[in-house]
Amino acid sequence: MVNWIKDNIHGDKIIWLIAIVLSVIGLLSVYSATSLLALQNKGGNTEFYLVKHFMLISFSFIAMWFSHRIDYKYFSRISLIGLCISVPLLIFTYKFGENINEASRWIKVPIINMAFQPSDLAKLSLIIYLSSFLAKKQYDLDNIKTLFIPFLWIGLICLCIALTNLSTALILGATSILLMFISRVKISHLSLLILFILFSRGIALLTGQRGYTALSRVEDFINKKNIPYQLEQAYIAVSTGGLFGKGPGNSNQKNFLPQSSSDFIYAIIVEEYGFLMGISILILYLILLYRGMKIFIDSERPFGGLLSAGLSFALVIQAITNMCVVVGLLPVTGVTLPLISMGGTSQLFTGITLGIILSVSRQNNFEKSYA
């Protein structure tokens, strides 16, 4: 077993360890959060969602393993194809997708009966495309004309996602800006990109499905008058968890908190495992970001470094956004906690994302050993 691991598991070992630890926490938390739901809807089979989530985690690690074995440079060749596929898929989803909570973010895949979220493909494709573009044009980034095409892709993808999911579009926009910033794109050019992203968001607010909801959530957050029901239940869960929590499976709010196994699973974790576990999870994500940036610094190839940084930014910004919402530092959003929340394709694409980061790390280690 040890020899197999040495021969087949490569890249940053700390990232592998963080992925395993967060997945185990997610498995335990999802089981607790969904036990009553399974009891009511699945004929008393309280393990139904546990088994389902375990299978999704297994598939995500398989995807992670395969991705980390592939030379990361291969992904640059297919990123533009991914973008071209994503745009019509996002528009189709907006018009004809499965509507849940007044948002059409999913396409139901026949036969396997699973929901596919095209925004996951779009996010991954855009970050890979930007990393590749910025690496190739690193000596010509002072020219605003060089940046026209990537600006256009960022605006288009963020607009298509924002039609149904404003928070994800903003996280992707922020990731794109950070990626360009560390590539030494001029601040004046970045200012134009920010305006472009805000313009796309404005169009989405006017024409998209979640414009009114997003504005009302921001207004409620600023005024602090009308606390949404789900946020109120999350506050109760967090405030009653104490330092060490109530113990595994002993959450009270899981029976009242909507989306307790996905968007608000962090509240259940803090309630059951306490403030220390909540802080520990935050630290694990920050270590993940640190390891991703270390790979960026150690990489001798610009594309690999930018790819690791961009994907790390995307995962950790999403995680911190989710946690900030639960504790009341940001308005309510619809983003999940990577590696922990119960999900479908989001779990799979998280595995692929980590696998690509590990592929860059594996290549760095290989080049160092032969230097």
Image (spheres, helix red, strand yellow):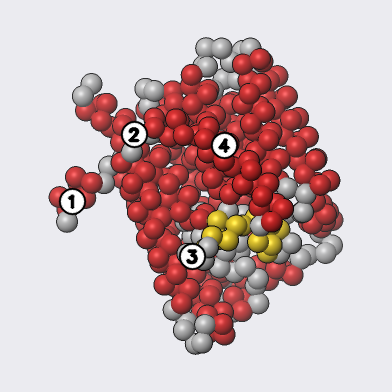
Q: Is residue 218 above or below residue 258?
A: above
Q: Comparing marks 2 and 1, which lies closer to the viewer?
A: 2
The disc label shown at residue 71, or none = 2
Q: Quadrant of the N terminus?
A: bottom left
Cβ atoms under marks 3 and 1 closer than 8 Å = no
What amino acid type should be assigned to the residue bearing mark 3? Ile
- Circle 4: element type: helix
Give the class, few, some or many, for how many residues have Cα within 10 Å of label 4's Cα (few <14, many ≥20).
many
Q: Earlier in the sequence, mark 2 or mark 1?
A: 1
Indicate which disc residue 111 carries: 3
How far is mark 4 from mark 3, CA to CA? 25 Å
Q: Earlier in the sequence, mark 4 or mark 2?
A: 2
In contact (CB < 8 Å): disc 2 and disc 1: no
Which of labels 4 and 3 is toward the front? Answer: 3
Residue at the location (66% across, 50% down)? 92
Does label 3 or label 2 sit earlier along the sequence?
2
Please state if 109 lies on the left or on the right of 90 as rendered: left
Q: Quadrant of the C terminus?
A: top left
Q: Which residue is mark 4?
A: 83
| Residue of label 1 | 4
**Nearer to us: label 3 or label 1:** 3
Q: Which dot marks residue 285? A: none
| Callout 3 secondary element | loop
The image shows residue 150 at horizontal and vertical percentages of 61, 26
Q: Is residue 257 above or below residue 24?
A: below
Mark 3 or 1 closer to N-term? 1
Q: Position of residue 307 (x, y in %)?
A: 46, 32
Q: In percent of the image, x 62 and y 68: which residue is there?
A: 259
Whole-percent x, y for residue 46 in the image: 47, 82
Nearest to N terminus: mark 1 or mark 4:
1
